[in-house]
Image (cartoon, helix red, strand yellow):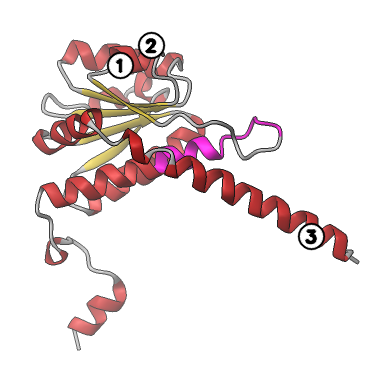
């Protein structure tokens, strides 16, 4: 049977995680400036699709960002940085833009994608936790999503860093939606409850 003391410890851990992650997201607010607006223009001017590229836990965040972009008027797809070199590079088109996410900014597979995108003449937006990294320095624009600490008590599991990247992705997607004047009626697929209401 769980003791009351143990429950208090677990609750305190959960609260600490939420505090660390919420503070990290709040720290992104002062970073919304010229770089963000440049990223907005790159994505708004994209005449193809937006490839959102990542690896590991960042890759999972990329999937969500790509899905959000696609559902709000900006066609996008997730490109796994490692799988790209086993045939998936063919997904990239001449009118596409690329968003890359890497906390370290030194992930080898991501840097390979960066080089290929440059050779293809595609604009690259980086989400990096290290503004001095190779990725941040060589992308067309870098959005700093660095965090002070991970919520993981060992500092190993990506937690705060992925939350920050996801929040920045949402900020870009929602601003892009407004920039494109995407409206409620423009949603390609309405939520099931709204579809059923309209079909009555």
The residue at 20%/10% (across/down) is 119
User: Which mark is in front, 3 or 1?
Assistant: 3
Using residue 8 as the reference point, say whether residue 61 is left or right of it.
Answer: left
Using residue 1 as the reference point, say whether residue 142 is left or right of it.
Answer: left
Q: Which residue is mark 1?
A: 114
Q: What's the magenta region?
A: 154-166
Q: CA distance from mark 2 to mark 1?
A: 10 Å
Q: Which residue is mark 2?
A: 134
Please tell me which of labels 3 and 1 falls first in the chain.
3
The residue at 12%/34% (across/down) is 46
Q: CA distance from mark 3 to mark 1?
A: 47 Å
Compare residues 68 and 199 and report the one nearer the observer.
Answer: 68
- Where disc 2 sits, the SS reads helix
Which percent across, then down, holds residue 82?
Answer: 42, 22
Compare residues 15 and 65 and report the one nearer the observer.
Answer: 15
- Where disc 1 sits, the SS reads helix
Q: Callout 3: 10 Å neighbours few (<14), some, many (20+)? A: few
Compare residues 68 and 129 and report the one nearer the observer.
Answer: 129
Residue 20 to residue 184: above or below: above
* Tag 2 near tag 1, CB within 8 Å: yes
Q: Callout 1: 10 Å neighbours few (<14), some, many (20+)? A: many
Q: Which residue is mark 3?
A: 8
Q: Quadrant of residue 158?
A: top right
């Amino acid at each position: 049977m769980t003791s009351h003391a143990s429950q208090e410890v677990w609750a305190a851990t959960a609260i600490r995680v939420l505090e660390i992650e919420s503070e990290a997201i709040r720290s992104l607010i002062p970073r919304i400036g010229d770089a963000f607006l440049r990223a907005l223009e790159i994505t708004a001017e994209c005449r193809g699709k937006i490839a959102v590229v990542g690896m590991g836990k960042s890759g999972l965040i990329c999937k969500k960002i790509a899905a959000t972009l696609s559902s709000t008027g900006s066609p996008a797809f997730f490109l796994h940085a490692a799988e790209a070199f086993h045939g998936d590079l063919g997904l990239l088109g001449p009118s596409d833009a690329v968003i890359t996410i890497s906390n370290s900014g030194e992930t080898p597979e991501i840097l390979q994608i960066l080089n290929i995108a440059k050779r293809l003449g595609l604009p690259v937006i980086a989400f990096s936790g290290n503004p001095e990294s190779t990725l941040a320095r060589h992308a067309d624009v870098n959005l700093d999503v660095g965090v002070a600490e991970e919520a993981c008590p060992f500092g190993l599991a990506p937690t705060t860093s992925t939350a920050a990247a996801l929040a920045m992705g949402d900020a870009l997607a929602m601003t892009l939606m407004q920039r494109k004047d995407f409206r409620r009626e423009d949603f390609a697929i309405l939520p099931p409850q709204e579809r059923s209401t309209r079909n009555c």
